[in-house]
Structure formats: C-alpha cells, structure tokens
Amino acid sequence: VQLQASGGGLVKAGGSLRLSCTASGRTFSTYTMGWFRQAPGKEREFVAAIGRSGGMTYYTDSVKGRFTIFRDNAKKTMLLQMNSLNPEDTAIYYCAGYANSFRPSSVVNDENYDYWGQGTLVTVSS
C-alpha cells in the first residue's frame, strides 16, 4: 500500500488543522494505522493510532483530548483532527500502517509499521 499525507500548514496557537492520509491499493481496511511526528532536532514520536475497523484508538498523553483519529475504509482515508494546537505540536507528521492487529504496545513503536507516507509539515505559531 502507498500512503499520501496532506493537510499540514501554518496555524496560530489555539487553532485547528485536519490531516489526511490517503491509501492506494485494495487492502487499506486490513491495516492498523497511525500518526507519528518529528519535531526539529528531535526523534520521531508516536501521536495516535487506530485499529482496522476504527473501533480502537490510542493516543500519546500530550494530545489526548485535543486530537482525534478516525478512518473511512470505503474512502481508504485516515484523518487526524487536531484542535487547540500549541507550538509544541510543530513537526512533520507522518502516517503509517502495518498489517497486524491493533495493540497499544505495538502501535507506539514505529518499527512495527511497514508503510509510511511522505510527511506533512505542521507549524504552530505562538
């Protein structure tokens, strides 16, 4: 599967953005999907993940209550709604997927993901 991330941009603190990840191929619904981000000078970190049917989600603590992950398997799309953004959210955001079942212990590890999008830049100004 090939993944294409989009939706990044420049937003003021307190604002919102919605990121999209669109997949090619016919097996999108069989993939656990996730979002990661990498801020300048920092390692890539887990943001959020969603199970194959969309029924299970998991978030890193810093985005809980502000970010929502969801997916539309019919449209082969995963979305990340980001609200109440702050400058610490500034990063390149990557979508990723792997073909195994959803487990919180697995989704946070980027080494478990087989497919990656190219990244989309989110910049939050103060």
Image (tube, rainbow, N blue to C red):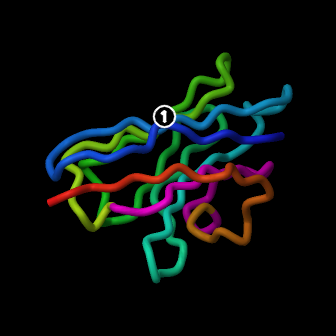
Q: Residues within 10 Å of mark 1 (few under 14, many from 20)?
A: many
Residue at 67 percent of width and 46 percent of height:
32
Q: Residue 8 location, x and y as percent?
A: 44, 43
Q: Quadrant of the C terminus?
A: bottom left
Above-or-below relation of 38 to 113? below
Which amino acid is tagged 1? Answer: Phe
**Residue 69 occupies quadrant:** top left
Q: Is residue 96 magenta?
A: yes
Q: Is residue 71 magenta?
A: no
Residue for badge 1 = 70
Q: Residue 50 location, x and y as percent?
A: 55, 45
Q: Nearer the viewer, residue 79 or 120?
A: 120
104 relative to 102 in the view: left or right: left
Q: Nearer the viewer, residue 49 or 76?
A: 76
**Residue 116 occupies quadrant:** bottom right
Above-or-below relation of 43 to 26? below
124 relative to 78 in the view: left or right: left
Residue at 31 percent of width and 47 percent of height:
10
Q: Nearer the viewer, residue 23 or 105?
A: 23
Residue at 67 percent of width and 17 percent of height:
74
Q: Nearer the viewer, residue 118 or 1?
A: 118
Q: Quadrant of the N terminus?
A: top right
Q: Residue 26 location, x and y as percent?
A: 85, 26
Residues shaded magenta? 90-106
Residue at 26 percent of width and 55 percent of height:
124
35 relative to 96 in the view: left or right: left
Dot 1 lies on which element? strand
